[in-house]
Image (cartoon, helix red, strand yellow):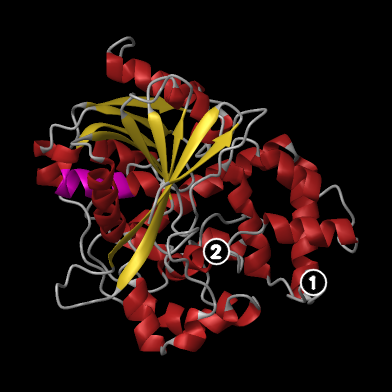
Amino acid sequence: MPIITKQLGDLRLDEHTLTVPLTTDPDDARTIDVFARVVTRPGGENLPYLLFLQGGPGHEAPRPSRDPLRPGWLAVALERYRVVMLDQRGVGRSTPVGDTILTEQTTDEVVEYLTHLRADGIVRDAEALRDHLGVTTWTTLGQSFGGFTTLHYLSTHPESIDRAFLTGGLSAIGRSADDIYAACYAKVRVVVEAYYRRFPEDREAIHGLLDLAAAGEVVLPDGEGVSVSRLRSIGHLLGDDNGWYALHSLLDHDPGSNVFRHDLAALLPFTGRDPLYFVLHESSYADGVTTGWAADRIEPEEFRADPTLLTGEHVRREWLDTVPALRPWKDVALALAEHPWPKLYDADALEASGAQGAAAIYVNDMYVPVEFSLQTAAHLPGIHRFVTSEHEHSGLRTSDGEVLAHLFDLADGRRLR
C-alpha cells in the first residue's frame, strides 16, 4: 500500500501498511496487514529509526498527540531518532482481532490463529518493516511485553538491532508461569500493604466493597455483576506510578452512585476492548510451557484468606462466566490455557548477541519481578542496568522522558552503571 503522510503540528507522520505472511509455513497462504506510523521531527528526516514495541499483549501502539506532545517520552526519542510506532499483529490497524472472529471461525481455528500472534510473529513483522524502510539496523525500545518481544528479537535477529532499550521488560528465561506468578503475588502483597499503610481507612472501604460484591450488589453499567475476584483485580492500578491516586479517588465515592460504577468499569483490567489482553496474557510469560491458569492455581494461601490483598495482572478462569465481554471467548481461552507454547528466548544466543543499550529495572515491579529481570540481564552484559525504586512499571510513560533520557545516557557512557 502507498505511504500516507500526515502532519501533527510540526511533526510528520508517515503511515505504512504491509501485507505479511501469518505463519512461517511456505504452504500457508494466509496473510495479515501490519501497520506502523513513523514520527519525524523537523530536521530529523535523516535520523536513524527507533522501533517502539508496546506493552500488552493486545494493546496498539500509542497515538501521538500535540500540545503537549504525548507520549511523554516521545520528545526525548525524537531528539535522536525517527520513531516507528508499530501496531503489533492482531491489534490497532494490524488486522485486529475482535469478537467477529468467533462467528467467522470455529474454536479450533481461532485458537490456531491466535497462536501466531505472539512475540515470534511480531518480530517477523518487525523484520519485514525494517526491510521495507530500507535500513540494515535500527534501535528498539520495548516497554513491558514489548521488552519480552525484544528478548526474542535479540535471540533470533541480533544483527538487526543497533541498540536495545527495555523498560520493565526483562522477562524470566526458562521459568514456568507458576514461578513467575508466585513472584508477582509476592510483589503485589508488598505494594498493596504499602498502600494500606498510607491510607489505612481504605482497607476497610475495600472490605465493605468486597462484601457488596459477594452479595451481587456491585453492578457495572453494562450489567456485569462484579465478582469478588474481579473487584480485587483493581489492585493492578498500584503497578502504575499514579495508580494509587486513581484507587484512592474511586473509594471516595458512594458505591451505589453512577460515578462509582462508571469509574470502576473504566479502571478494571481485562475488558472487552482488548480481548487479546485477556486470552493471550498468560502466554506472554510462557517460555516453552503450558500455563494452565497459573495465576488461579498458585494463588498464595494468604491471598485466599485475606481478600483485601488486592491482585494485579492475574487473569481468572471464572471471569469467562462472570464478565459479559469475556463470555464469548470462553472456549478459546480454555483451549489456549492448555496449549504447549514453544520457547521464545535463548540464553546462549542472548549472550552471543553482543547487544548494546540499557534497561530500566523497577525494584517494586508488580508485573516483571526484579529478581528474574536481574537474572536475565546477566545474559546481556552490554545492556547497562538502571535499577530503581523511584518508579513503578509505568516509569517510561509517567516520567515524561526522564527514564528514557537516563537510559540513553547510560548507553552513551555518560553515567555509571
| x 29%, y 20%: residue | 411
Q: Position of residue 82 (x, y in %)?
A: 39, 30
Tell whether 89 sits left or right of 172. Answer: right
Mark 1 residue type: Val
Q: Residue at x 55, y 64 (%)?
A: 274
Structural crowding at the residue carrying mark 2, measured as other residues with C-alpha within 10 Å and reported as few (<14), some (14–19) or many (≥20) = many
Where does label 1 land, which residue?
219
- Specify whether 304 is left or right of 406: right
Which image quarter is the C terminus in?
top left
In the rendering, at what x and y percent does residue 320 appear?
A: 56, 79
Secondary element at image label 2: loop
Prevailing secondary structure of the magenta residues:
helix
Q: Residue furthest top?
A: 414
Magenta range: 149-157
Residue closest to the eye, 47 or 55: 47
* Rendered image: mark on residue 274: 2
Q: Nearer the viewer, residue 102 or 19?
A: 19
Quarter in which the N terminus is drawn: bottom left
What residue sits 32% from the left and 9% below the top?
414
| Residue 79 in the image, given as x and y percentages of width and height | 43, 19
Specify whether residue 147 is painted magenta.
no
